[in-house]
Image (cartoon, grey):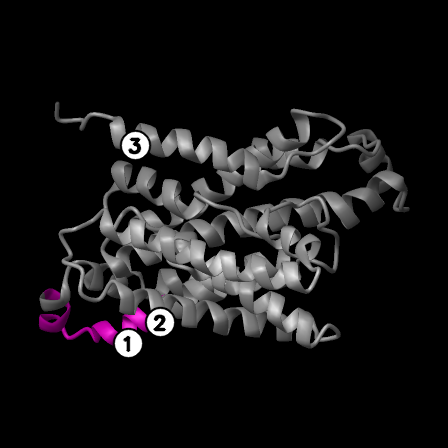
């Protein structure tokens, strides 16, 4: 993680040298290197770390709540609904602040997830593959509606900014909403034991005095808010919430109190690595991190599915 942070701070199109930073510190005066570091490089790296943590933790929460390892926020309609809400509020109230847009996107994500949970209510818990399949179809329908509205209102270019996660536009003053996801991740760690008990089954949660409905809706609300903030700030990034929790679960088990910090660390490191690859593979141009992680995430997920159990 530390090495990836140093690489992320060092790589970029603009001229930058660590010797210039050292000279700025010694002379206690700002120069082009220190300004670039403070305005662009550090905000971008922090935004990448917070996004990776948020999407990985959100994926872990939704997998525990739905008791299914094959789902993530983009497979339950959360990110698509957030993009739809963001598009609608941008068209109706173009001068609204980021807080208003984030709030509307969060409400839309909550409603989208509620509708999805109603759709899968009658599916047997043992039918693991039907839930992600329904989620993919459900998310595709919402995305189609969003694209149709954008096409009719000539807003496809604006919509494409939210549909492809990219950190090239992150500067100081444009990413601070992501700190909210950090607070939500801390809250997730605080209630980790309750989430773990809910994931063990309805009867066990009832016997241990845990309100399944209350904990479930707290988890759904947290996932919706994390997804909305990420979409508003940097756009959609798929597969983080699917691949990272599965890798950590195989290595450390399903106890959230122990595995959640590892999920956050691996999520941040994975997004940092993909962003560095995206900045380097066609230098000086950038490939969006969502594209890189889509390829890497697909390969990793196929490996998880095809990998033989360790006992064999």
The residue sitting at the front extreme is 152
Percent position of residue 143, x then y:
50, 57
* 147 w.r.t. 11: above or below: below
Magenta stretch: give its range.
204-219
Circle nearer the viewer, 3 or 1: 3
Q: Mark 1 and mark 2 in contact (Cβ < 8 Å)?
A: yes
| Residue 217 on the magenta segment | yes
Q: Position of residue 6 (x, y in %)?
A: 64, 34
The residue pinned by badge 2 equals: 218
**Does the magenta portion include 186?**
no
Q: x and y percent of residue 306 in the render? A: 26, 27
Q: Please give the label number shown on residue 214.
A: 1
**Side (left or right) of 121 relative to 90:** left
Residue 229 visible within the image: no
> Residue 251 placed where, x, y %?
27, 36
Which residue shows up at 31% across the image and 41% down it?
246
Residue occupying image coordinates x 42% and y 62% = 223
Q: At numbered mark 3, what does the secondary structure look like: helix, strand or loop?
A: helix
The answer to the question of whether label 3 and label 2 lie on touching residues, with beta carbons closer than 8 A, is no
- Label 3 sits on residue: 304
- The mark found on residue 256 in the picture is none
In this orientation, which residue lies closer to the viewer: 123 or 306?
123
Q: Which residue is more in the foreground, 53 or 131?
A: 131
């Amino acid at each position: 993680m530390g090495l990836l942070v140093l690489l992320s701070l060092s790589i970029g199109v603009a001229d930058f040298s660590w010797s210039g930073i050292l000279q700025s510190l010694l002379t206690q005066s700002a120069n082009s290197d220190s300004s670039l570091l403070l305005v662009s490089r550090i905000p971008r790296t922090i935004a990448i770390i917070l996004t990776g943590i948020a999407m990985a933790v959100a994926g872990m929460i939704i997998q525990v709540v739905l008791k299914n390892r094959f789902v993530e926020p983009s497979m339950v309609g959360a990110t698509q609904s957030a993009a739809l809400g963001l598009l609608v509020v941008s068209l109706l109230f173009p001068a609204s602040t980021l807080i208003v847009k984030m709030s509307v996107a969060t409400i839309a994500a909550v409603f989208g997830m509620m509708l999805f949970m109603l759709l899968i209510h009658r599916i047997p818990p043992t039918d693991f593959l039907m839930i992600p399949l329904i989620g993919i179809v459900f998310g595709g329908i919402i995305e189609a509606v969003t694209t149709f509205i954008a096409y009719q209102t000539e807003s496809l270019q604006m919509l494409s900014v939210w549909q492809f996660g990219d950190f090239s536009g992150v500067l100081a003053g444009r990413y601070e909403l992501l700190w909210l996801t950090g607070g939500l991740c801390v809250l997730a760690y605080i209630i980790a034991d309750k989430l773990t008990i809910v994931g063990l089954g309805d009867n066990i949660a009832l016997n241990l005095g845990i309100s399944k409905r209350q904990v479930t809706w707290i988890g759904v609300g947290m996932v919706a808010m994390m997804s909305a903030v990420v979409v508003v700030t940097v756009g959609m990034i798929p597969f983080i919430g699917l691949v990272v929790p599965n890798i950590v679960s195989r290595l450390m088990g399903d106890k959230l109190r122990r595995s959640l910090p590892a999920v956050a660390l691996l999520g941040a490191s994975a997004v940092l690595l993909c962003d560095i690859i995206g900045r380097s593979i066609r230098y000086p141009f950038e490939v969006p991190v969502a594209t890189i992680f889509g390829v890497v995430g697909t390969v990793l997920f196929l490996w998880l599915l095809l990998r033989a159990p360790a006992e064999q």
